[in-house]
Image (cartoon, rainbow, N blue to C red):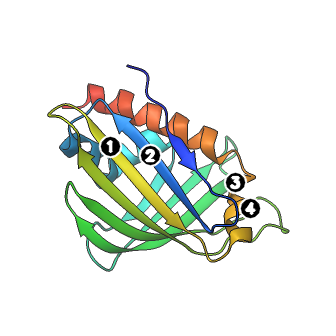
Amino acid sequence: MERKTTIQAENGKQDLLITREFDLPVERLFKAYQEPELVAQWMGTKVLKLENKQHGGWQFETTDAQNKVVFRAHGVIHEFMPNRKITRTFQMENPLTSAQRFEVQLEFLEFEPLTLTTSRLTIHTVYRSVASRDLMLQLPFAKGLTMAHNRLQTIMNQVN
């Protein structure tokens, strides 16, 4: 079944609610967020650091064909409950233009079993301000997230 990532952004609010159902058991969905090799595959990025524990950190980086960094982000993992929850911060290190400045955001990722073979990921992202959230929504954020989640589904269908 074709699944789609949905993003709810209410006017005047400084958060997003992102949901996606997967044709994967919750343990396999969580594994895609837990194992650096899998994260690198479905996100299409280098995983420079991924410490899956309370007070752990993470850092991802994407380069172009000339090995120039086009995206780098990092954060701290505040809560890590296998197959249930990840609470972390997220901050882009290199905005696309000098006019863009992305502040730290807080992400609550919740992994929910729906059946033995399906699960739901809910990501509640909180921004410092409505303006910060709206700046993120000006990027091709939704399209990129849907593409990444589609790759996640495909890759995890092939991984044992």
Q: Residue at x 23, y 57 (%)?
A: 84
Q: Residues within 10 Å of mark 4 (few under 14, many from 20)?
A: few
Lower position in the chain sequence, tag 1 or tag 3: 1
Measure the alpha-carbon separation of dots 2 and 4. 20 Å
Outermost residue, bottom side: 55
- The kind of secondary structure element at disc 4 is helix
Residue under pointer 2: 19
Lower position in the chain sequence, tag 2 or tag 4: 2
Residue 100 percent across, percent down from the top left: 79, 67
The label nearer to you, 2 versus 4, is: 2
Lower position in the chain sequence, tag 4 or tag 1: 1
Q: Residue at x 62, y 38 (%)?
A: 143
Residue under pointer 3: 137
- The kind of secondary structure element at disc 2 is strand
Occupied quadrant, residue 81 = bottom left
For badge 1, the amino acid type reads: Arg
Q: Is residue 36 left or right of residue 148?
A: left
Q: Residue at x 42, y 46 (%)?
A: 40
Residue 103 percent across, percent down from the top left: 65, 75
Measure the alpha-carbon separation of dots 1 and 3. 22 Å
- The kind of secondary structure element at disc 3 is helix
For badge 3, the amino acid type reads: Leu
Residue under pointer 1: 120
For badge 4, the amino acid type reads: Leu
- Decide which of 106, 14 is in the foreground and name it: 14
- The kind of secondary structure element at disc 1 is strand
Disc number at residue 111? Answer: none
Disc number at residue 135? Answer: 4
- Decide which of 12, 45 is in the foreground and name it: 12
